[in-house]
Amino acid sequence: MRQLRGFGALSAVIALGALAGCQKPAPGVTLQSGSRVVRASPAVYERGGKQVTGTREVKVLKVHPGAVVNIDVDRSLAHRGWTVHITTGSSGSDTVNSPVLHQQHFSFNAGSANSDVVVSQQGTGRSPSGLWAFTLQPSLQ
């Protein structure tokens, strides 16, 4: 009987420790074009006033030139506000910046050259509180 009580107490301590370590995951961003989909976690994200570094991997989405590219963001990101920055060409001279968005969806047409797409979450002041990075690669397949 003592062993069962000890096991119960140990189980309760483990469960409390597991719950204390739980955090809400950082919001994600999904890009979709045709049947292709990529989802990214933030490269940098602010949580509780502290900057957290996430994955530095830039997600790549192959797209047909002229195809519609859809961006979907998690609800918490849409609630705070977000922007899209699309840079095309090697010199970065062709850049499109969206206004601040509060809906979960944004779409645009893919160009015929590689494009860098950065989604940024509105922060306080001029600095974003989150960044998600993607590359669009034109593909005829």
Image: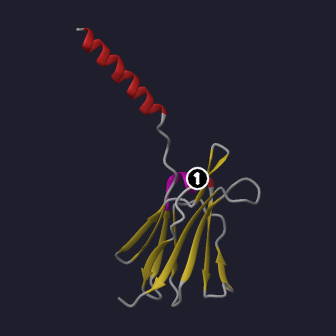
Q: Nearer the viewer, residue 139 or 17?
A: 17
Q: Position of residue 47 (x, y in %)?
A: 61, 46
What residue lies at 68% left-to-right and 59% top-to-bottom? Answer: 128
* Residue ID at (52%, 77%): 135
Where's the N terminus, which quadrant? top left
The quarter of the displayed image where residue 17 is located: top left
Residue 48 horizontal/vertical position (percent):
63, 42
Identity of the residue drawn at 29% across and 18% down: 7
In the current view of this chain or complex, which residue is farthest to the left?
Answer: 1
Q: Is residue 55 left or right of residue 91?
A: left
Q: How many marks?
A: 1
Q: State the SS at label 1.
A: helix
Q: Nearer the viewer, residue 130 or 44?
A: 44
- Is the residue 136 above or below the residue 119 in the image? below
Q: Where 76 falls versus 133 (above or below)?
A: above
Left or right: residue 25 versus residue 127 is left
Residue 58 vertical position relative to residue 52 in the rendered view, above or below:
below
Task: Residue 2: name its quadrant.
Answer: top left
Q: Main secondary structure of the magenta part?
A: helix
Q: Which region is colored magenta? A: 73-78
| Magenta stretch: includes residue 75 | yes
**Picture quarter containing residue 118?**
bottom right
Quadrant housing the C terminus: bottom left
Q: Which color mode does the image show?
A: secondary structure
Residue, far top? 1
**Residue sitting at x 39%, y 70%:** 37
Q: Is residue 86 magenta?
A: no
Query: Residue at label 1?
Result: 79
Image spot of residue 76 (x, y percent): 54, 51
| Neighbours of disc 1 within 10 Å: few (<14), some (14-19), many (20+) | some
Query: Extreme front residue here?
Result: 3
Amino acid type at circle 1 is: His
